[in-house]
Amino acid sequence: MRVIVKKWGNSASVRIPAAIMEAASLSLDETVDVREEDGRIVIEPIRHSEYDLAQLLAGITPDNLHDEASFGPAVGKEAF
């Protein structure tokens, strides 16, 4: 699909057609990575989850592992 590079302030911009936005599951105001690869401009959505359980668990070491925390006796129906 052809688009025209336009001036936007001191920068250049292109409009991303709605069909491309939808196909890439991209929303307005979403952060993207823009880079040059082999003379091509690559615009890629930045997709990451807030937390990755495997990475969090891999970060546990004997040095940062703490003992069980006591919050006192049960006060409601939370006891098993």
Image (cartoon, grey):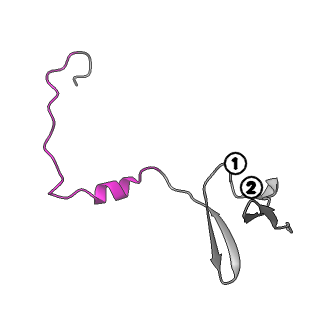
Tell me the distance, in whole angstroms, between the alpha carbons under discs 2 and 1: 9 Å
Total count of labels: 2
Q: Are marks 2 and 1 in contact (CB under 8 Å)?
A: no
Q: Which mark is residue 21?
A: 2
Image coordinates of residue 34 in percent, x first then y, are 63, 67
Identify the secondary structure beneath mark 2.
Answer: helix
Question: Residue at 81% across / 67% down in the picture?
Answer: 5
Which residue position holds label 1? Answer: 28
Q: Magenta part of the protein: which range?
A: 50-75
- What's the amino acid at mark 1? Leu
Which dot, 2 or 1, sits closer to the camera? 1
- What's the amino acid at mark 2? Met
| 16 within the magenta span | no
On screen, residue 18 versus residue 62, left or right, reads right
Magenta span: predominant SS is loop
Is 46 drawn above or below residue 76 in the view shown? below
